[in-house]
C-alpha cells in the first residue's frame, strides 16, 4: 500500500490528510534537548549521523507522524561552499559574509559540497533503514534566495536588507551567487534522494520579501531549475516548495516551478487557498504555530477549520511555520486528534 504522504503528493484527495510538522524535531521535546546536550552543540548534532537520525525519529515515535524530515539545517550548504558558520547561543547563526563578485568567485565549486555533506547523506541512509514502513522520509535544502540572504548578511535579518542591497549594487554578482547555490543544491538534493529521501522540500523562508520581477528571477527561476534537474535525474521524485509569505504569488507557483505541492504559511487563509492554490494540486499547511503554545478549544477549532477547508483536494496537514520551543508537547497530540476527527 502506498504511503499516505506519497498519495497526497501524487494528487489524491484523501478522507484524512497525512500529518507532519515543520521543526518537529526540536527544542519543545525533552528527548531532543537531551540528545542535543549529548552532541554538545547544534552543528555537532547535524554532523553526527547516529544522533541526527535519533532526533529525526523522536517525533515519529512520540506522535506517529506520516513523514519524518531529515535533521540538518539549510546553512550546512553555505558551509560546504566554503563559508564559515557558527551558532551564537541565544542569538542564532553567524556566517562569514559575501558581498562582492570576487568573493562569489572564490566559493568552492558546486561539486565540492559532497565531501563536506557526506555525514548528512549517512543520516539519510540510517533513516531509510530505520523508519517505520508507513513513514515517508523528506530530504530538504534552502531555496537559493533564502540561502543567499544568510550568505550575504552573515546572519538572519528581519528585512533581508543586505541581500537586497547587493542585488541592487551588482545584479550580475548576486545572480552568480544564486547560480552557484542552485547548482550545489541540485547536487545536494540529488545525493539525498540517492541515499533514500522519498520527497524533497525547498524552504524559501524569505520569498515574501521579493517583489515583481525579483520574485520571478530569484524565487521562481532557481526553484524551477532545481526541480527540473531533480526530476530529470530521479523521475517521479515529489517536490514540496515553501515560498513563505508569497501572498498572491502563491497563485500559479506550482505550475510555474513544477512543484508537486506548495506549502502555505499561516498568513494566507485555507479557504482562499482551497480555490486559488489547491486547484493546481497538493497544498500543505497551515496552522499558526502559536496554537501549539496556547492550546485549548481554539487549537482544535483551527486545526479542524483548516482540515475541512482543504478537504476537497489533495492536502498535507502541517503548520504555517516551524513549531516554537515554548510549545506544549501535549498540544501536538490534541492537534493530531482534532485533524483526524474533523
Ligand atoms: O538550538 C537548536 O537546537 C537549534 C535550532 C535549530 C533547529 C532545530 C536550527 C538553527 N535549525 C534546526 C533544524 C532545522 N532547520 C530543520 C530540521 C528538520 C525539522 O524541521 O525538524 C530544518 C528543516 C531547518 C530549516 C531552516 N533553518 C530554515 C528554513 C525553515 C524556517 O524555519 O523558515 C531556516 C531559515 C534555517 C536557519 C536557521 N537555523 C537555525 C535557526 C535558529 C535558523 C533561523 C535563523 C534566523 O533567521 O535568524
Image (spheres, grey):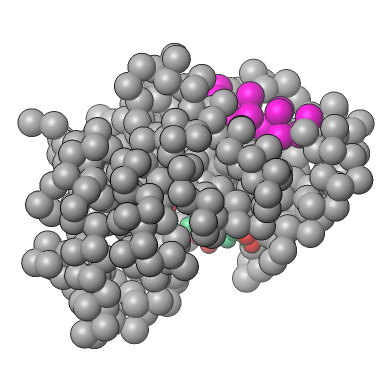
Q: Residue at x 44, y 71 (%)?
A: 325
Looking at the rendered image, the quarter that the C terminus falls into is bottom left
Q: Residue at x 41, y 56 (%)?
A: 264
Q: Magenta includes 304?
A: no
140 sits to left or right of 319: right
Q: Where residue 78 appears, x then y in whole percent?
A: 68, 38
Q: Residue at x 30, y 56 (%)?
A: 274
The answer to whether residue 66 shows anywhere in this view is no
Relative to the observer, which residue lies in front, 232 or 72? 232
Q: Where residue 338 appears, x then y in whole percent?
A: 16, 70
Q: Where residue 127 appears, x then y in whole percent?
A: 31, 35
Relative to the observer, which residue lies in front, 235 or 46? 235
The answer to whether residue 258 shows anywhere in this view is yes
Indicate whether 321 appears above or below 109: below
Q: Residue at x 44, y 60 (%)?
A: 265
Quadrant in the picture for residue 181: top right
Q: Where residue 232 appears, x then y in whole percent?
A: 44, 15
78 sits to left or right of 44: right
Residues rendered magenta in the picture: 176-191
194 sits to left or right of 89: left
Magenta segment, prevailing SS (helix, strand or loop): helix
Indicate whether 138 appears above or below 159: above
Number of marks: 0
Amino acid at each position: 500500500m502506498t504511503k499516505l504522504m506519497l498519495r497526497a503528493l501524487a494528487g489524491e484527495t484523501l478522507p484524512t490528510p497525512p500529518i507532519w510538522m515543520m521543526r518537529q524535531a526540536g527544542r519543545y521535546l525533552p528527548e531532543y534537548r537531551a540528545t542535543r546536550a549529548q552532541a554538545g552543540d547544534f552543528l555537532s548534532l547535524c554532523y553526527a549521523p547516529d544522533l541526527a537520525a535519533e532526533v529525526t525519529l523522536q517525533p515519529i515515535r512520540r506522535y506517529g507522524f506520516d513523514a519524518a524530515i531529515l535533521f540538518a539545517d539549510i546553512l550546512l550548504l553555505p558551509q560546504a561552499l566554503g563559508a564559515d558558520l557558527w551558532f551564537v547561543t541565544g542569538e542564532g547563526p553567524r556566517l562569514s559574509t559575501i558581498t562582492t563578485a570576487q568573493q562569489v568567485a572564490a566559493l568552492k565549486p558546486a561539486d565540492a559540497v559532497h565531501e563536506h555533506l557526506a555525514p548528512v547523506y549517512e543520516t539519510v541512509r540510517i533513516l531509510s533503514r530505520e523508519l517505520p514502513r508507513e513513514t515517508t522520509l523528506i530530504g530538504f535544502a534552502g531555496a537559493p534566495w533564502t540561502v543567499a540572504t544568510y550568505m550575504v548578511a552573515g546572519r538572519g535579518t528581519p528585512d533581508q536588507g543586505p541581500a537586497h542591497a547587493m542585488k541592487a549594487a551588482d545584479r550580475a554578482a548576486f545572480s552568480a551567487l544564486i547560480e552557484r547555490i542552485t547548482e550545489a543544491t541540485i547536487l545536494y538534493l540529488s545525493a539525498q534522494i540517492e541515499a533514500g529521501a522519498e520527497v524533497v522540500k525547498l524552504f524559501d523562508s524569505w520569498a515574501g520579501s521579493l517583489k515583481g520581477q525579483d520574485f520571478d528571477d530569484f524565487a521562481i527561476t532557481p526553484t524551477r531549475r532545481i526541480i527540473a534537474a531533480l526530476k530529470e535525474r530521479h523521475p517521479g521524485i515529489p517536490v514540496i516548495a515553501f515560498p513563505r509569505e508569497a501572498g498572491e504569488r502563491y497563485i500559479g507557483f506550482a505550475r510555474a516551478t513544477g512543484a508537486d505541492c506548495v506549502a502555505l504559511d499561516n498568513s494566507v487563509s485555507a479557504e482562499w487557498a482551497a480555490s486559488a492554490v489547491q486547484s493546481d494540486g497538493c497544498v500543505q499547511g497551515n496552522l499558526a504555530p502559536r496554537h501549539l503554545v496556547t492550546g485549548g478549544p481554539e487549537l482544535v477549532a483551527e486545526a479542524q477549520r483548516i482540515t475541512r477547508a482543504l478537504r476537497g483536494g489533495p492536502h498535507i496537514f502541517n503548520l504555517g511555520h516551524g513549531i516554537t520551543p515554548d510549545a506544549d508537547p501535549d498540544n501536538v497530540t490534541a492537534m493530531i486528534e482534532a485533524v483526524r476527527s474533523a
